C-alpha cells in the first residue's frame, strides 16, 4: 500500500469550507484528494472564497488536519504531532512546518498555526484550549471549530451528524 493509499483509507471525512459573498459553503471532498498535503492544498485552491478556503480532515478518529489556503499561501494546523509517527500526511504536515519528527514516546500536542482561523472568529487561545481537551474526538473538535466560525449546521449536515 502506498503512502497515498494509507492516507486516503484512514480518512473519516474531508471537507472544504469557504465563504462566498459572506455566506458559508461546505462541501465534502473525495478522500483521494487527501492523499498528500500538496494535492489537498491544490484541491482547496479550487474554492476561492472570501478569505480563502479551509480544509478540514479527520483521520482514523485519531487526529485532524486543518489547511487554509489563500492564493499561493497556506497555513497548517495538525491536532496531534504524534500522528506523524503513523500517518504519512501528518508526517508531511510536520515536515512542511519545519518541525522535528516526533518519537513514539512524545506526548500528544498540536503543531502549526493555532491562529489559523483567528480572523474568522476563533483565536489561538480558544484553539489551544480546545486542543487540550483529550476527551474529544477529532470530529467533535472540528464540530466545535465549525460552530464557532459560523458553519456548524453545514458541518453537521456534511458529516451526517443529524442523521445519526
Image (cartoon, rainbow, N blue to C red):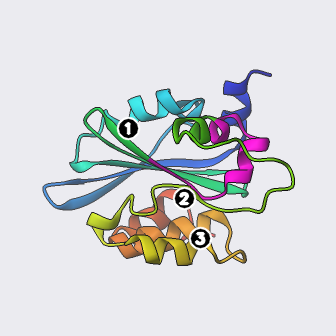
The residue closer to the viewer here, 69 or 49, is: 69
Q: Which residue is mark 3?
A: 131
Foreground disc of the pair 1, 3: 3
Location of the C terminus (image quadrant): bottom right
Location of the N terminus (image quadrant): top right
Mark 1 or mark 3: whose residue is earlier in sequence: 1
Q: What are the residue bounds of the magenta stretch? A: 76-91
Give x and y (percent) for residue 41: 42, 34
* Residue at position x 69%, y 34% in the image: 88
Q: Which residue is mark 2?
A: 159
* Label 1, label 3: how far apart the Cα atoms are: 23 Å
* Residue at position x 65%, y 42% in the image: 90
* Label 1, label 2: how far apart the Cα atoms are: 18 Å
Q: Residue furthest right?
A: 105
Q: Which residue is mark 1?
A: 44
The residue closer to the viewer here, 7 or 132, is: 132
Amino acid at each position: 500500500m502506498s503512502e497515498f493509499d494509507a492516507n486516503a483509507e484512514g480518512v473519516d471525512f474531508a471537507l472544504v469550507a469557504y465563504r462566498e459573498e459572506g455566506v458559508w459553503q461546505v462541501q465534502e471532498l473525495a478522500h483521494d484528494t487527501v492523499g498528500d498535503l500538496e494535492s489537498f492544498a491544490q484541491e482547496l485552491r479550487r474554492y476561492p472564497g472570501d478569505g480563502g478556503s479551509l480544509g478540514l480532515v479527520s483521520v482514523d478518529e485519531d487526529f485532524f488536519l486543518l489547511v487554509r489556503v489563500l492564493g499561493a499561501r497556506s497555513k497548517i494546523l495538525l491536532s496531534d504531532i504524534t500522528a506523524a509517527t503513523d500517518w504519512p500526511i501528518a508526517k508531511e504536515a510536520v515536515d512542511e512546518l519545519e518541525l522535528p519528527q516526533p518519537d513514539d514516546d512524545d506526548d500528544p500536542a498540536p503543531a502549526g498555526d493555532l491562529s489559523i482561523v483567528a480572523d474568522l472568529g476563533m483565536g489561538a487561545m480558544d484553539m489551544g484550549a480546545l486542543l487540550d481537551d483529550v476527551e474529544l474526538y477529532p470530529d467533535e473538535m472540528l464540530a466545535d471549530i465549525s460552530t464557532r466560525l459560523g458553519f456548524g449546521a453545514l458541518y453537521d449536515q456534511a458529516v451526517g451528524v443529524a442523521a445519526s
